[in-house]
Image: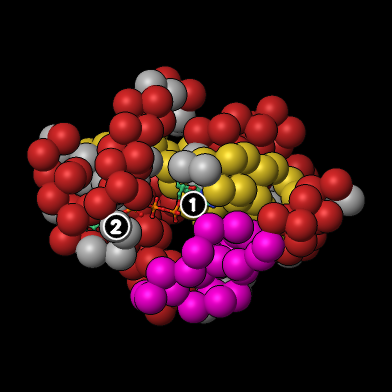
Amino acid sequence: MADEALKRRGMILILSSPSGAGKTSISRAVLQEENEQDAGSIHLSVSVTTRKRRSSEVEGVHYKFLSPRQFESLRDHEDLLEWAEVHGNYYGTPREPVEAALAQGQDVLFDIDWQGTRQVLEKMRADVVAVFILPPSAAEQRTRLERRAEDDGAVIKRRLANARDEIGHWEEYDYVLVNRDLNDSVAKVRAILHAERCRRVRLVDLPEFIEVLDRDLAGQP
Ligand SMILES: Nc1nc2c(ncn2[C@@H]2O[C@H](COP(=O)(O)OP(=O)(O)O)[C@@H](O)[C@H]2O)c(=O)[nH]1
Ligand SMILES: Nc1ncnc2c1ncn2[C@@H]1O[C@H](COP(=O)(O)OP(=O)(O)O)[C@@H](O)[C@H]1O
């Protein structure tokens, strides 16, 4: 990235939450604000899924919508970094775009569930920062799902029933936040991202930088 003194390896920023807690709203705002500040620094990992497209979603932007057969073919060819069945549908992360972005020092945002998070942590712990988002209360979570009005009653019921299972994995995450005020949550996720970018292990040319600094200091009168 243009304004950084040190070359950096990219990271995977995972956002997980029970349905309706607000991770999609937070991720869209984080991506927009970050790219206004520094274009191309972070992008969404576009998952593949067998679930039906919602009216607000655009093919290839929010998800790639596949048939079960297409999904299984990708999975069986090891083209997915992780995959899981969630709320009765398959979801997975295409591997190649993520590996390319990390190598170029770009960050990738994952909106994935706890099962996927576990797989990515097992494979790539050093490159992963995992954030768990909670709703302020069960009543507010239900209200948000109903207000979103993208799913029918049975689907909302299933998502709320699965919420306890998802929340049960909070201890597997590096950071946890309660999404009460959206702007506040977006600011917190951006603060996490900015701090994590400075981690020593991500600064790939730090040893050379220190060596030059040290040599120049030694050579000073
Ligand atoms: N493991 C995994 N989970 C995913 C992936 N994409 C989405 N999910 C999760 O699947 C769940 C359902 O997502 P979605 O159908 O968009 O519903 P929403 O959470 O109610 O907005 C959420 O927990 C997502 O984080 C993926 O590629 N892999
Ligand atoms: N902090 C918040 N306060 C009030 N409403 C919110 C907040 N965050 C998200 N929402 C709303 O709640 C609904 C569910 O949010 P969404 O981002 O789709 O959740 P998720 O992706 O976790 O299922 C949406 O209608 C969204 O506009």
Q: In the figure, is residue 65 to the left or right of 80? A: left
In terms of depth relative to the viewer, which is nearer, 80 or 152?
152
Q: Is residue 42 magenta?
A: yes
Q: Residue furthest front?
A: 154
> How far across and down, in percent of the image, does residue 211 sit?
77, 45
Residue that carries the numbered disc 2 in the rendered image? 152
Q: Is residue 56 magenta?
A: yes
Q: Give the SS element for disc 1.
A: strand
Above or below, 81 relative to 70: above
Q: Residue at x 62, y 68 (%)?
A: 64
Residue 186: mark in rendering: none
Q: Residue at x 16, y 35 (%)?
A: 138
Q: Are marks 1 and 2 in contact (CB under 8 Å)?
A: no
The answer to whether residue 200 of the structure is visible from this angle is no
The answer to whether residue 154 of the structure is visible from this angle is yes
Question: Rounded to the nearest whole Å, what is the CA distance between mark 1 and mark 2?
Answer: 22 Å
In terms of depth relative to the viewer, which is nearer, 17 or 76?
76
Above or below, 108 relative to 138: below
The residue carrying mark 1 has its beta carbon less than 8 Å from ligand 1? yes
The type of residue carrying mark 1 is Asp
Q: Residue at x 69, y 42 (%)?
A: 82
Q: In the figure, is residue 58 to the left or right of 75? A: left
> How far across and down, in percent of the image, does residue 53 sit?
48, 69
Residue that carries the numbered disc 1 in the rendered image? 111
Q: In the figure, is residue 124 to the left or right of 15? A: right
Magenta part of the chain: 41-67
- Taking the image as four quarters, which one is ligand 2 found in? bottom left
> How far across and down, in percent of the image, does residue 52 sit?
50, 64
